[in-house]
Amino acid sequence: MSITFYYTPNTSASRVHWVLEELGMPYDKVKLDLRAGDQHKPEFLAINPNAKVPALVVDGTPMFESLAIIIYLGDRFGVEKGLWPRVGSGEHAEALAWIVWGSVTLGGSIFRIFHNTSEWFPADARNAIQAESARQEFDGQLKILDQRLQGREYLVGDRFTLVDAANAAAIAWALSFIKVDTSGLSNVTAWLDRSTRRPANQATQGA
Ligand SMILES: N[C@@H](CCC(=O)N[C@@H](CS)C(=O)NCC(=O)O)C(=O)O
């Protein structure tokens, strides 16, 4: 089997990187310099026509969208490693719900905050009202997450899964540029620390 991972550090690719390390499978890495425009080169566009990281090529089949990649890796390789529930089980249903929520609902708020505050985007494309409205949504979603984690260590079942990696990576990235009052979020704070301390995540830092 051959797996090639296309990534840039500190982006949406980071959670896929973490997942690949958790799975402990051999893979090749190709680092793209987004500021230099590597994502627009024809050879990368042939893999992801959206010109964004991450992308993954498994035995010649290209994939993009971090959420799709993580679910694919979980279904195909994660079950036997105890990192993903068996397809068709109740826990698999919960895993899909929480991982999609983390990417689409929570992730949507994070991206709206980023797009409306980051200097990566031109000043006239940023909107303070949009940023504030997304910020309020994000605060509410963190409370929902905190309630979910009440009395439990991980989001699904009684052990760490790729759902925790996907969501913790997104939130850790968000907290690097969004100031959050974490009082009242003790479950989220403890879960984030518990998850991000894992060796597989640490191995991706600076890589
Ligand atoms: N929904 C996509 C988002 C991918 C994305 O926005 N990637 C950004 C980095 S976080 C990117 O490659 N941007 C390059 C560009 O827009 O030129 C995913 O989860 O894979």
Image (spheres, rainbow, N blue to C red):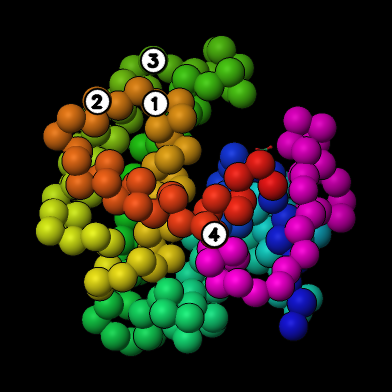
Q: Which residue is mark 4?
A: 200
Q: Quadrant of the N terminus?
A: bottom right
Identify which amino acid the numbered label 3 is placed on.
Answer: Ala
Q: Which residue is mark 2?
A: 181
Identify which amino acid the numbered label 1 is placed on.
Answer: Ile
- Per the model, the C-alpha gap separating discs 4 and 1 is 25 Å
- Per the model, the C-alpha gap separating discs 4 and 3 is 37 Å
Q: What secondary structure is found at the residue carrying circle 2?
A: loop
Query: On the image, which quarter does residue 82 sit in?
Result: bottom left
Q: Are marks 4 and 1 in contact (CB under 8 Å)?
A: no
Q: At x 37% / y 85%, what residue is drawn? A: 86
Q: Is residue 185 above or below residue 134?
A: below
Indicate which label's residue lies in the foreground, 4 or 3. Answer: 4
Among numbered discs 4 and 1, the one appearing first in the sequence: 1
- Per the model, the C-alpha gap separating discs 2 and 3 is 20 Å
How busy is the neighbourhood of tag 3: few (under 14 within 10 Å), some, or many (20 plus)?
few
Among numbered discs 4 and 3, the one appearing first in the sequence: 3
